[in-house]
């Protein structure tokens, strides 16, 4: 009896227009008539999507999409992205762009080459990209009947703008940059911080004057924007006297008729750290701010860690209030003369020991609370290291003084 030779069967699956959303493990299973598995095979599909990476300060970025396949002149080209829903980024049909079909977030910011169907260059230029544009974009070409003729994807990554400063060492202000273009007439501009919680309004501009009554008290009298900002398109925010409490994620949101813009800026204000070895004559905890402070300004230096918080030095009514300081710091602290005039509020601590290690905060305020300045300094005092000489009869202290 002769067996029938096995017949090769091609059970391959063809997937048209694969995208990154199709990345997965696929299983092909063959069952016999009784429902038992005869053959089972798995195939892993990984769809690699081209990625474009740019800084948030560039004027524009191009999402490339080119083909050599002839396309009909009546085809429709659609650029989309998916966030919560499918969003229309750019539509080209009937020989021209269709801006009325765009999502307003992209209106006035996109452009395609002339006669893209004839040239085969369907690339999209996106102006003024920000991290809010970080999506995977899909270019789809449809026939007049609605059939898909071509589909390509491009992933865009716009790096978030990061600003970093060190507090307490003469840094009077920091700028959070944002420049844009377009019709900004009657635009509303709002800077707000949404990390860490809770969200708060940092600065608001609408119809000419700044809306200072709407900003959070913590930022009152500390923010400034450029004059004629709607004309120049420079919406950068200047933040005075930055401290570690200002560290966070900031967003500038612009809304005008038929236009929206957003930009994120990460601000990191680094704590000043002072390190030295016990035995040094003195150490200065630095704090330089804007000069010509009101004569009724009060300056407090406290050690807040380890707890409990204790008063280290108090300057009030134009003089030191030594009776208010903790006994551990009696006769060991000193501040500069004319400190309110010069803005140099640094504190000199004499004969520092390990017990002085901790986190110090300097706070400035007036009786009317019209000004508020502060800085944080971390002081680390290490113990002495003793080494014996060759005879082993004496110890020599090793001391160093370093400010970081």
Image (cartoon, grey):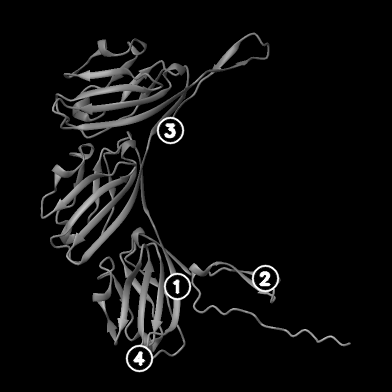
Q: Earlier in the sequence, mark 1 or mark 4?
A: 4
What residue would you read off at disc 3? 404
Q: Secondary structure at mark 2?
A: strand
Q: Can you say whether 70 is above or below 56 in the image?
A: below
Q: Earlier in the sequence, mark 4 or mark 3?
A: 4
The percent position of residue 364, horizontal first and vertical second, equals: 23, 28
Q: Earlier in the sequence, mark 3 or mark 1?
A: 1
- Residue sitting farthest toward the top: 393
Q: Secondary structure at mark 3?
A: loop
Q: Are marks 2 and 4 in contact (CB under 8 Å)?
A: no
Q: Quadrant of the N terminus?
A: bottom right
Left or right, 117 with reference to 200: right
What residue would you read off at disc 2? 41
Q: CA distance from mark 2 to mark 1?
A: 29 Å
Q: CA distance from mark 2 to mark 4?
A: 43 Å
For label 3, the crowd category at 10 Å Cα-Cα, with few meaning under 14, some 14 to 19 and many 20 or more, is few
Q: Are marks 2 and 1 in contact (CB under 8 Å)?
A: no
Q: Which numbered dot is residue 73?
A: 4
Mark in front: 2 vs 1: 2
Q: Secondary structure at mark 4?
A: loop
The percent position of residue 42, horizontal first and vertical second, equals: 65, 69
Nearer the observer, 230 or 395:
230
Q: Earlier in the sequence, mark 2 or mark 1?
A: 2
Q: Can you say whether 380 is above or below 178 in the image?
A: above
For label 2, the crowd category at 10 Å Cα-Cα, with few meaning under 14, some 14 to 19 and many 20 or more, is few
Q: Earlier in the sequence, mark 2 or mark 3?
A: 2
Residue at point 34% right, 36% down? 244
């Amino acid at each position: 009896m002769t067996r029938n030779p096995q017949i090769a069967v091609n059970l391959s699956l063809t997937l048209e227009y694969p995208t990154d959303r199709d990345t997965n493990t696929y299983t092909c299973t063959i069952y016999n008539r009784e429902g038992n598995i005869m053959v089972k095979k798995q195939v892993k599909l990984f769809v690699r999507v081209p990625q474009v990476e740019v800084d948030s300060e560039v004027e524009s970025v191009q999402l490339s999409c080119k083909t050599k396949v002839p396309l009909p002149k009546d085809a429709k080209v659609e650029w989309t992205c998916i966030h919560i829903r499918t969003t229309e980024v750019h539509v080209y049909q009937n020989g021209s762009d269709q801006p009325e079909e765009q999502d307003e977030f992209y209106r006035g910011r996109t452009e395609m080459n002339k006669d893209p169907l004839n040239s085969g260059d369907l690339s999209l230029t996106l102006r003024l990209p920000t991290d809010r544009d970080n999506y995977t974009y899909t270019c789809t070409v449809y026939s007049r009947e609605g059939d898909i003729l071509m589909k390509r994807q491009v992933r865009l990554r716009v790096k978030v703008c990061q600003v970093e400063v060190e507090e307490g060492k003469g840094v009077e202000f920091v700028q959070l940059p944002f420049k844009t273009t377009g019709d900004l007439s009657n635009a509303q501009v709002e800077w707000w911080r949404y990390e860490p919680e809770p969200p708060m309004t940092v600065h608001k501009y609408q119809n000419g004057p700044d809306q200072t009554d709407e900003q959070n008290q913590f930022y009152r009298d500390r923010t400034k924007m450029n004059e004629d900002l709607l004309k120049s398109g420079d919406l950068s925010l200047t933040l005075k006297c930055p401290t570690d409490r200002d560290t966070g994620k900031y967003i500038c949101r612009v809304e005008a008729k038929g236009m929206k813009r957003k930009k994120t800026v990460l601000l990191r204000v680094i704590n000043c750290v002072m390190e030295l070895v016990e035995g040094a004559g003195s150490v200065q905890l630095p704090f330089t701010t804007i000069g010509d402070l009101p004569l009724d300004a009060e300056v407090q230096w406290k050690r807040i860690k380890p707890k409990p918080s204790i008063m280290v030095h108090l300057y009030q009514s134009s003089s030191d209030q030594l009776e208010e300081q903790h006994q551990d710091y009696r006769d060991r602290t000193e501040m500069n003369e004319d400190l309110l005039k010069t803005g140099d509020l640094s504190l000199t601590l004499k004969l520092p020991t390990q017990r002085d290690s901790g986190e110090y905060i300097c706070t400035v305020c007036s009786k009317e609370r019209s000004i508020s300045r502060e800085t944080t300094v971390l002081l680390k005092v290490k113990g002495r290291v003793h080494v014996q000489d060759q005879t082993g009869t004496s110890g020599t202290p090793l001391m160093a003084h370093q400010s970081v």
